[in-house]
């Protein structure tokens, strides 16, 4: 009896790890470039020293897409895939445009408190855009699950894997930015403009492709 219980536990752990790994690979794979591009645009306005604001921002995005991922996975909400496919790059373009608009005030805004008016708006925007991205994650998750009935454990593992992948992406971005600012003496304002401009260009291309296909 104990042996059977241990085997069952190992099977559960194995399945959990499997879906966790799938979540990580989903966010870090080449096919998830739109989600990574959003993370890049989202983080482009923040220096490594602003890690508290960045943590809240990414957490807000996480909460948003976790909610819609769960609701969509249980068929409680649903949007046409074409609409989601178009909406995701729109969130990237809007985030990048916001960065570009406020780039000249980056030093001033970096001095604001964690929950100042402008920062709070950024958090709420990340939360809202997270709701959109969650629908994109849900499509991939449904495809993986097929006809399985019980998905709570798999959903949790997949979601945690996605979060782990996002954390890896943010850490890498901040390390690159630290090197650029500290050792290569790159202007932070120029960094914002270049990164956000590139993100906006790619996002607009994705929107056009989605609308014309």
Image: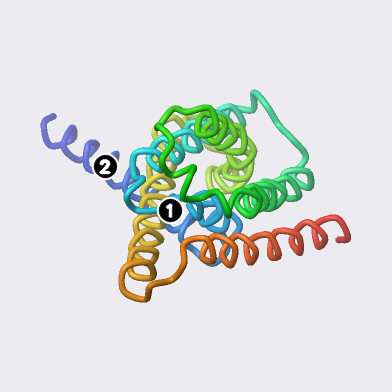
Establish if 151 lies above or below 88.
above
Q: Which image quadrant: the C terminus?
A: bottom right
Q: Residue sitting at 16 percent across and 37 percent down?
A: 6
Where residue 9 sits: x, y (%)?
A: 22, 37
Where residue 40 sits: x, y (%)?
A: 51, 57
Q: Residue sitting at 39 percent across and 47 percent down?
A: 161
| Viewer-closest of 115 and 199 | 115
Q: Which residue lies furthest to the left in this view?
A: 2
Name the side, left or right, on which 133 lies relative to 202. Answer: left
Q: Answer few, some or many: residues within 10 Å of disc 2's Cα (few below 14, many 20 plus, some between 14 and 19).
A: few
Q: Which residue lies furthest to the right in this view?
A: 212
Name the side, left or right, on which 78 lies relative to 158. Answer: right
Asked whether the residues under the numbered discs 2 and 1 touch, taking CB atoms below 8 Å apart as contact, a structural biologist would say: no
Cα separation between marks 2 and 1: 14 Å
Q: Mark 2 points at which residue?
A: 13
Tag 2's secondary structure? helix
Where residue 139 sits: x, y (%)?
A: 63, 44
Q: Earlier in the sequence, mark 2 or mark 1?
A: 2
- Mark nearest the camera among 2 and 1 is 1
| Viewer-closest of 74 and 23 | 23
Q: Residue sitting at 41 percent across and 43 percent down?
A: 54
Q: Which image quadrant: the N terminus?
A: top left
Q: Report the number of numbered marks.
A: 2
Name the side, left or right, on which 55 lies relative to 14. Answer: right
Tag 1's secondary structure? helix
The label shown at residue 22 is: 1
Q: Residue sitting at 51 percent across and 50 percent down?
A: 106
Q: Residue furthest top?
A: 76
The label shown at residue 40 is: none
């Amino acid at each position: 009896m104990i042996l059977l219980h241990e085997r069952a536990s190992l099977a559960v752990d194995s399945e959990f790890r499997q879906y966790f790994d799938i979540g990580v690979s989903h966010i870090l794979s080449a096919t998830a470039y739109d989600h990574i591009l959003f993370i890049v645009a989202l983080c482009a306005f923040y220096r490594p020293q602003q890690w508290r604001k960045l943590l809240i921002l990414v957490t807000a995005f996480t909460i948003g897409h976790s909610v819609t991922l769960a609701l969509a996975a249980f068929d409680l909400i649903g949007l046409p895939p074409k609409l989601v496919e178009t909406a995701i790059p729109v969130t990237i373009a809007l985030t990048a445009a916001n960065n570009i608009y406020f780039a000249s005030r980056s030093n001033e805004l970096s001095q604001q408190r964690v929950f100042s008016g402008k920062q709070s708006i950024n958090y709420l925007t990340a939360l809202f855009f997270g709701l959109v991205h969650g629908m994109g994650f849900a499509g991939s998750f449904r495809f993986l699950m097929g006809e399985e009935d019980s998905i709570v454990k798999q959903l949790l593992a997949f979601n945690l894997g996605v979060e782990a992948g996002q954390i890896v992406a943010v850490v890498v971005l901040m390390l690159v930015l630290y090197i650029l600012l500290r050792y290569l003496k790159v202007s932070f304002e120029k960094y914002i403009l270049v990164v956000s401009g590139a993100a906006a260009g790619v996002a607009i291309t994705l929107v056009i492709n989605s609308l014309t296909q």
